[in-house]
Each structure stands twice: as C-alpha cells, then as structure tokens.
C-alpha cells in the first residue's frame, strides 16, 4: 500500500499526499473534538427493521456486536422534542420538518392556498415528498427508532465475518453497483470499471471507499485476545491496531494488487463527502444545532463554522458539476443511481451484527445525504437557498453526514499510523 503515496486519486484532481496533509493536520483534529458534542453524539436509528431480501439467519453472538442502549435521562431535552419552538424560530425559511408554523415559504404557500380539502392538501405534500426522491430509505421518525449514543458504541472489530458479511458485500457489489454484464469477478477493479461512465464509476468507488474505511477501523481497533481467555461470548483482551490484519486486507501481495485501489477509493469518497459539506456550508452556518443547552449549542455552532471555514478553502474539491449533465439518458441514469442507492440502504437491515448495522446505516445515510446535496439540486442549489426555496436537511441527515466525514477522516489518519507501524 506504500504505492499509494503520490498517487493521483482517480476521478479527482489531487493526490493522496495533499489529502493526507490537509486531513491529518486540519480536518481530523477539528472533527475529533466536534463529534463529542451532544448534537452529533446521539443518533436516532431503527435497528429492528426486518431484512426485506432474505431470512435473517445471522444473529451475532459475540459480545462486541451488541449496541449499548441509551438511558432516557442521557438524551438532551432538545432532542426529545421538549422544546421544538426554539429550533423552529431559529431559521425562518430553513426549518426542520415538524415545526408547526409556516415552516418554509414555498410549502407554506401551497398549504394555505390549495388546502381547501385536507385530502388534496395531503396529495400535494405527498407529491412534494416524492419529488424530493430521497437517496435513503431511512426514516428517523420511525416509531421503532431509538437514540444511540455513538461514543458509547465505537466502530471497531466485532468478529462479524463469514457467509453473512460476504452476502451483504456481495449483494451490494453484484446487484446494486453498476456492473458490466461480462464481469465475472466483482472484486477485480480494473475489470469492473472497464468502459464504465463517470457516474457509474463514482457509485462503485464510493461503496468501495466505504468498505475500505469500515475494514480499516476494525484493523485499527482490533481485539488482541489474551492467551487462553478465548470465549466468543465474552472474549478478553486489549484493543489496538493490528498490522497483520491490515496487511492481510490491503497489501498488494495478499490482494492481487487491489488493496491500493481500495484505499484510493477511500480518499475518493472522503473528497466527495467533503465537497458536499462545502456545498452545504451556507445552510449549515445557519443551523442552530439545538439540544436545549444554550452554551453547548453555541459552542457547536462555533466548531462547525471553524470546520467549514477550513473545508471551503480546500482548493481541490471533487467536481460534481460534470455529472448527470445531459438529456433524457442522464435523467434515466440518475434515477437508476438513486434506486440502486436506496436498495443499499435497505440491505443494511440485513447486516447480522447490531454494531456493524448501526455504523453501516449511519455511514450509508451520511453518503446518501452527501449525494442529495451534490445531485438533487444541481447547480441551482445555492441559488435555491438565497431565493428561499425549499431545501431541508433533517437532523439525522446532518448528524450522519458529519459523523461519516468523521469516520473517513479517522480512516485516513489511521492509515498514516499503519504506515508508521509498518516501517
Ligand atoms: P470482506 O471485507 O468481507 O470483503 C469481501 C471481499 O470483498 C474481499 O474478499 C475482497 O475481494 C473484496 N473487497 C474487500 N475490500 C474491498 C473494497 N474496499 N472494495 C472493493 N472490494 C473489496 N466487522 C467488524 O469487525 N466491525 C464492524 O464494525 C463491521 N462493520 C460492517 C458493516 C457492514 C455494513 C458490513 C457488510 C460488514 C461489516 N463488518 C464489520 C465485517 C467486515 O467488513 C468484513 O466483512 C469481515 O471482517 C470479513 O472480512 P473478509 O476479509 O472476509 O473480506
């Protein structure tokens, strides 16, 4: 994986060294402290949804697959909806769903002028929601969703592997990534990408980058078992980086040269999500990050401003404007892109380890949010904000996007540590 350094990141205009420096010195330390704040720490998720594709036969028995529940008293009052009004009045035209007053100009207008019959009104709202064409089939208002404290449940080695884990990755790559018909091996990247257009390559690289990131975390936070103390239900040992495990997964000799491509895909995904944050900067600068604790909310706003100031100055952002530009063909491709992605969000319900499912869902939702920012509103998006047209990010979208960037940023930082440990 040493070949990675100096490498130009495919489909982007900068190299790995530039990103390493920018991330490790500027972004990572900021995110690390920001993600301990209550607004980002509590994520609402439904881990009980049934797998819609196959009978789930993979309940994980290992202690570390378990997700630690959140005590009701730990959840900040503002997140429990005790005092929505503050969030609602903070930004007149960019308010979250659920605010009772005229929560945005355009929908408010629809609502008051055409809503003579409640049913008609409902149909209009439904049409509006459909038009938003979400990338993710994840709903934070789901009745079975619960708050999880992410700091209590770090992403790390859980022992989830074998048939169940492979079935998930396999069905993502084989059925839900764009794949040329004549490809036999879903994992040989050069074969997979042969003749693919930019949009399809971006889709594949994003998923592969996420896969690489998850696997780096489990190598960086691996359980080194105490000799003799091995029982699957309650293994004992110390947590730390496992260089052998990392080499097994990424070295060229063990991966027929694919490891370096997968790591390059991690950098690609990082740049893609960073660009989404930069594009949403104006929106996020107005977000109150409300939790009910005035001092902490103010602190969070300042931390976000500081991060956004750094990110928006990065000169080599991913250029999404060349994607999906064209006629009917491109419209069709964009629709397919969304459908494939939504399917992947549903596959996350089939992950047979709750901890992996939690972080898998969060990171897929974060990526879906990035795609929504980059592609749903095309170039008119910043204009849409200045013209006060509808654009809204739900709290869970903001939390998942920023945590996802945090995960990718941590992976890049951890890679550097593996580089040093391998010397
Ligand atoms: P896998 O990682 O299962 O990969 C299968 C095959 O895919 C490999 O043989 C290789 O040919 C190919 N491949 C590998 N990496 C890439 C890539 N980046 N791009 C393209 N192709 C690739 N385990 C944990 O311990 N902790 C977790 O938090 C965790 N979270 C998970 C979340 C999800 C959504 C999923 C599906 C799995 C998760 N796992 C987690 C399991 C972990 O990702 C591996 O599946 C598991 O460790 C088995 O690894 P493996 O060596 O068999 O290869």
Image (spheres, rainbow, N blue to C red):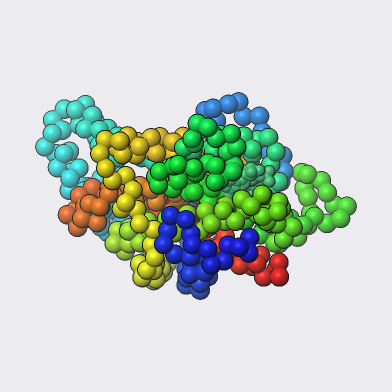
Q: Is residue 316 left or right of residue 212?
A: left
* Residue at position x 44%, y 48% in the image: 202
The answer to which of 349 and 9 lies nearer the viewer is 9
The answer to whether one can see residue 252 in this image is yes
**Does 172 appear above or below 400?**
above
Q: Quadrant of the N terminus?
A: bottom right
Q: Position of residue 80 (x, y in %)?
A: 42, 49
Locate residue 272, reporting x and y percent: 42, 55
In-image side of 148 versus 228 (left or right):
left
Q: Viewed as shown, does residue 387 lie left or right of 87? A: left
**Viewer-proximal residue among 53 and 336:** 336
Place residue 327 in its image quadrant: top left
| Spot occupied by residue 232 in the image (x, y as percentages of width and height) | 78, 44
Whether residue 31 is visible, yes or no, is: no
Q: What residue appears at the point 44 percent right and 42 percent down from the top-left corner?
A: 196
Relative image position of residue 365 (x, y in whole percent): 45, 46
- Image side of residue 313 versus residue 18, left or right: left
| Number of numbered discs overlaid on the protein picture | 0
Dividing the image into four quarters, tell me where ligand 1 lies: top right
| Residue ranking furthest to the right | 228
Residue that sits furthest to the left in the current view: 113
Quadrant in which the C terminus appears? bottom right
């Amino acid at each position: 994986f040493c070949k990675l350094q100096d490498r130009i990141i495919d489909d982007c205009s900068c190299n790995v060294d530039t990103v390493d420096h920018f991330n490790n010195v500027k972004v990572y330390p900021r995110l690390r402290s920001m993600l301990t704040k209550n607004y980002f720490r509590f994520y609402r998720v439904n881990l009980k949804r049934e797998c819609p594709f196959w009978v789930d036969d993979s309940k994980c028995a290992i202690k570390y697959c378990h997700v630690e529940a959140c005590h009701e008293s730990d959840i900040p009052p503002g997140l429990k909806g005790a005092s929505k009004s503050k969030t609602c009045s903070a930004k007149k035209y960019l308010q979250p769903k659920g605010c009772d007053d005229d929560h945005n100009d355009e929908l408010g207008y629809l609502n008051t002028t055409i809503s003579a019959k409640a049913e008609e009104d409902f149909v209009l709202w439904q049409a509006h929601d459909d038009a938003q064409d979400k990338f993710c089939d994840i709903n934070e208002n789901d009745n079975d969703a619960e708050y999880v404290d992410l700091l209590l449940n770090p992403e790390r080695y859980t022992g989830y592997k074998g048939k169940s884990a492979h079935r998930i990755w396999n069905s993502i790559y084989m059925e839900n990534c764009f794949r040329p018909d004549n490809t036999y091996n879903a994992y040989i990247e050069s074969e997979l990408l042969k003749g693919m257009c930019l949009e399809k390559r971006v889709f594949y690289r994003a998923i592969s980058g996420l896969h690489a990131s998850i696997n780096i975390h489990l190598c960086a936070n691996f359980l080194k078992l105490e000799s003799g103390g091995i029982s699957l239900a309650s293994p004992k040992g110390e947590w730390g980086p496992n260089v052998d495990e990392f080499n097994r997964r990424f070295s060229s000799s063990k991966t027929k040269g694919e490891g370096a491509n997968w790591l390059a895909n991690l950098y690609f995904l990082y740049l893609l999500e960073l660009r989404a944050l930069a594009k949403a900067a104006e929106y996020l600068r107005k977000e109150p990050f409300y939790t009910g604790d005035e001092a902490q909310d103010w602190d969070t706003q300042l931390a976000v401003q500081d991060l956004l100031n750094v990110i928006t100055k990065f000169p080599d952002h991913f250029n999404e404007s060349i994607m999906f530009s064209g006629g009917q063909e491109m419209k069709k491709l964009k629709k397919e892109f969304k459908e494939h992605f939504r399917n992947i969000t549903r596959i996350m319900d089939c992950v047979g380890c709750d901890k992996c499912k939690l972080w898998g869902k969060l990171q897929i939702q974060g990526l879906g949010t990035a795609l929504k920012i980059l592609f749903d509103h095309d170039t008119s998006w910043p204009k849409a904000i200045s013209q006060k047209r509808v654009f809204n990010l739900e709290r869970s979208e903001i939390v998942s996007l920023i945590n996802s960037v945090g995960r990718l940023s941590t992976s890049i930082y951890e890679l550097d540590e593996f580089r040093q440990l391998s010397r």
